[in-house]
């Protein structure tokens, strides 16, 4: 079987790489991308079969810009991975914490370690595009005064030493990754969906939607409002739904949709299970 081509924001040994292998297995062909938007474009152009995109973290919260990217790209959510994120402070072998003048990483990784990073004195934090890319730059340029916030798989991949273990603010630090494709295929045992919609400003408009799902025992596991670009008084609601009876979900959907406008079913898929970041 030909390896699936998976677009990720980042390079090999990044958390997106690990999430891709958790979902598809080790036999994948990575399509590294500089940005999340580019990873979606690779799927749209046919250069990748799927892309993997981080959407929220239990410490740093949701990546709201990625919701906009998914909406604009019109890709479908076909799966998800919940992965425990371990973050360490990495540096060249022989470097000491006292030598470090800058710490580089992805902005979300830096946010997940704020308590530790704020305890350091005289160190500049530099937010860049990818944890693994930061590590590669340190190795290629032999930057003795630069450390990187990244995972253990990145330390192994680039031969970096761990100056400080587990610097994440909370040990139960999970990131949710979405698996995105161009088409929605029938997924065996699908029990979760993501939808988006808008509402008018009438009283109880949101309650009517919530009641429609409640009436059919469909659970709302997440609900979030996101401002619509260029329309500050309008919001898109993003909702994750879970069910045990597929027929009940369809009935609830039929009841809820007329209460909304600009409704979109972003994808139906199987709920992901919690996993660690080790392969």
Image: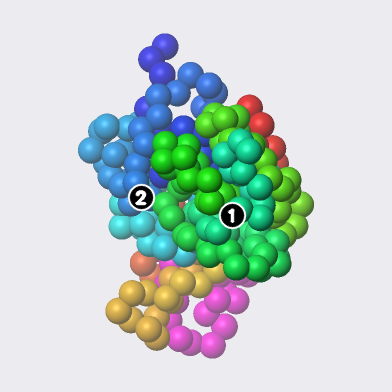
Residue drawn 47% across and 60% down?
Answer: 127
Q: Position of residue 152 (x, y in %)?
A: 64, 37
Picture coordinates of residue 48, whole percent (x, y) = 32, 32
> Horizontal placement of 184 versus 192: left or right?
left
Q: Is residue 201 magenta?
A: yes
* Magenta residues, start to end: 194-213
Reply above or below: 165 against 58. Answer: above
- Taking the spot 38% from the left edge, 50% from the top edge, the residue there is 36
Residue 259: % across, % down: 47, 72
Q: Quadrant of the C terminus?
A: top right
What residue is disc 1 on? 100
As for residue 89 lying within the magenta part, the answer is: no
The image position of residue 159, as x and y in percent, is 57, 30
**Mark sitting on residue 35:** 2
Quadrant occupied by the N terminus: top left
Q: Is residue 85 left or right of residue 8?
A: right
Q: Secondary structure at mark 2?
A: loop
Question: Residue lying furthest left in this view?
Answer: 45
Q: Secondary structure at mark 1?
A: loop
Nearest-to-viewer mark from 1 and 2? 1
Which quadrant would residue 100 be assigned to in this image? Answer: bottom right
Q: Nearer the viewer, residue 173 or 246?
A: 173
Residue 22 in view, yes or no: no
Residues packed near mark 1 inside 10 Å, few (<14), some (14 to 19) or many (20 plus): some
């Amino acid at each position: 079987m030909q390896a699936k081509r998976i677009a990720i924001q980042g390079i090999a040994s990044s958390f997106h790489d690990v999430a891709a292998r958790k979902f598809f297995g080790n036999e994948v062909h990575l399509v590294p991308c500089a940005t999340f938007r580019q990873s979606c474009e690779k799927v749209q152009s046919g250069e990748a079969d799927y892309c993997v995109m981080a959407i929220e973290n239990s410490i740093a919260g949701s990546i709201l810009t990625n919701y906009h990217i998914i909406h604009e790209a019109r890709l479908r959510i076909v799966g998800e991975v919940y992965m425990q994120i371990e973050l360490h402070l990495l540096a060249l072998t022989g470097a000491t914490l006292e030598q470090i003048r800058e710490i580089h990483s992805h902005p979300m990784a830096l946010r997940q370690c704020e308590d530790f990073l704020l305890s350091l004195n005289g160190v500049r934090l530099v937010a860049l595009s990818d944890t693994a890319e930061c590590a590669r730059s340190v190795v290629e340029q032999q930057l003795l005064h630069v450390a990187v916030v990244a995972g253990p798989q990145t330390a192994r991949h680039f031969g970096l030493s761990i100056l400080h273990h587990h610097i994440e603010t909370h040990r139960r630090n999970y990131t949710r990754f979405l698996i995105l494709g161009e088409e929605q295929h029938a997924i065996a045992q699908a029990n979760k969906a993501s939808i988006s919609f808008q509402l008018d400003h009438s009283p109880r408009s949101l309650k009517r939607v919530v009641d429609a799902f409640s009436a059919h025992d469909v659970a709302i596991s997440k609900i979030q409002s996101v401002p619509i670009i260029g329309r500050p008084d309008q919001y898109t609601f993003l909702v994750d739904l879970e069910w045990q009876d597929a027929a009940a979900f369809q009935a609830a959907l039929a009841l809820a949709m007329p209460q909304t406008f600009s409704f979109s079913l972003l994808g139906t898929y199987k709920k992901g299970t919690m996993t660690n970041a080790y392969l």
